[in-house]
Amino acid sequence: MRQYLVDILAVSFFVLEWSVYALTLEHTAYGRSSLSARMHVYREVWIRRMLDREARMVDMQIMASLQNGTAFFASTSLLAVGGALALLRSTNEALAVLKALPIDISPSPALWEIKCVGLILIFIYAFFKFAWAYRLFNYVAILLGSMPPAAERDTPDAQAHVLRTTRLFESAGRHFNRGQRAFFFALGYLGWFISPWILFASTAAVVVVTWRRQFASNAWRAMES
């Protein structure tokens, strides 16, 4: 058990960093200034301006592009699951390759399989998030199609429909962001296949990169005003 202590600590650090980052981004006042949160505001702006237009073909085209992007990531998640399963099935071959390296970094077969299972679970989680986001985008498209005409934009029913559509739109975007976050952290998780110490470093690198994109990137500054 003692020989696996560093691995346990590294995986615990990975899970903790992912959880803290996600909770900070989605459930704290600090996260409300993130790039994703700022984009949530413009979802409502879009829906309200759409209510003023009679011709909404461009809006539906934009909606279709969002759906297609989500479907692409969902398909990619399934391919990643398949690749991870193939890696799990090829345990002996993979360990033979690692043993042939100048520095022997090959783990035990059981530990290797645990690592593969963890990677599979991450991509399964990502698939469910992207698949649900795609379903929600479909629902949003239905709500856009049932948007009241511009002549009724000031009625209580029209305003309620805008808020309903915006909330569902935000939920779809939130699940999409969670799926992408799983992809980013999956890249950090790959460091564990080399060494638990690499997992510490790769996890920290993923957190820094994703934090910078949300709070210090050029895109974030462009949305500041």
Image: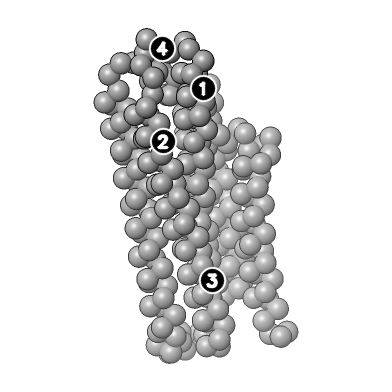
Labels 3, 1: front one: 1
Within 10 Å of disc 1 (Cα), the crowding (few <14, some 14-19, many 20+) is few
Within 10 Å of disc 4 (Cα), the crowding (few <14, some 14-19, many 20+) is some
The vertical placement of 12 against 39, above or below, is below
Q: Can you give x and y, in whole percent of width and height, for residue 127 in the image?
A: 44, 58
Of labels 3 and 2, earlier in sequence is 3
The answer to whether the residue labelled 4 contacts the one labelled 3, judged by CB atoms less than 8 Å apart, is: no
Residue appearing at x 55%, y 43% in the figure? 212
Residues at marks 4 and 3, CA–CA distance in whole angstroms = 52 Å
The answer to whether the residue labelled 3 contacts the one labelled 1, judged by CB atoms less than 8 Å apart, is: no
Of labels 2 and 4, earlier in sequence is 2
Labels 3, 2: front one: 2
Q: Which residue is mark 4?
A: 152
Q: Amino acid at mark 3?
A: Gly
Residues at marks 1 and 4, CA–CA distance in whole angstroms = 12 Å
Residues at marks 2 and 4, CA–CA distance in whole angstroms = 20 Å
Q: Please give left or right for residue 17 compared with residue 133 in the image.
A: right
SS at circle 4: helix
Q: Can you give x and y, in whole percent of width and height, for residue 40 in the image?
A: 51, 32
Of labels 1 and 4, earlier in sequence is 4
The answer to whether the residue labelled 1 contacts the one labelled 4, judged by CB atoms less than 8 Å apart, is: no
The answer to whether the residue labelled 1 contacts the one labelled 2, judged by CB atoms less than 8 Å apart, is: no
Labels 4, 3: front one: 4
Residues at marks 3 and 1, CA–CA distance in whole angstroms = 43 Å
Residue 105 seen in render? no
Of labels 3 and 1, earlier in sequence is 3
Q: Which residue is mark 3?
A: 118
Residues at marks 3 and 2, CA–CA distance in whole angstroms = 33 Å
Q: Which residue is mark 2?
A: 140
Q: Can you give x and y, in whole percent of width and height, for residue 113 in the image?
A: 51, 81
Residue appearing at x 63%, y 50% in the figure? 21
Q: Can you give x and y, in whole percent of width and height, for residue 53 in the image?
A: 34, 16
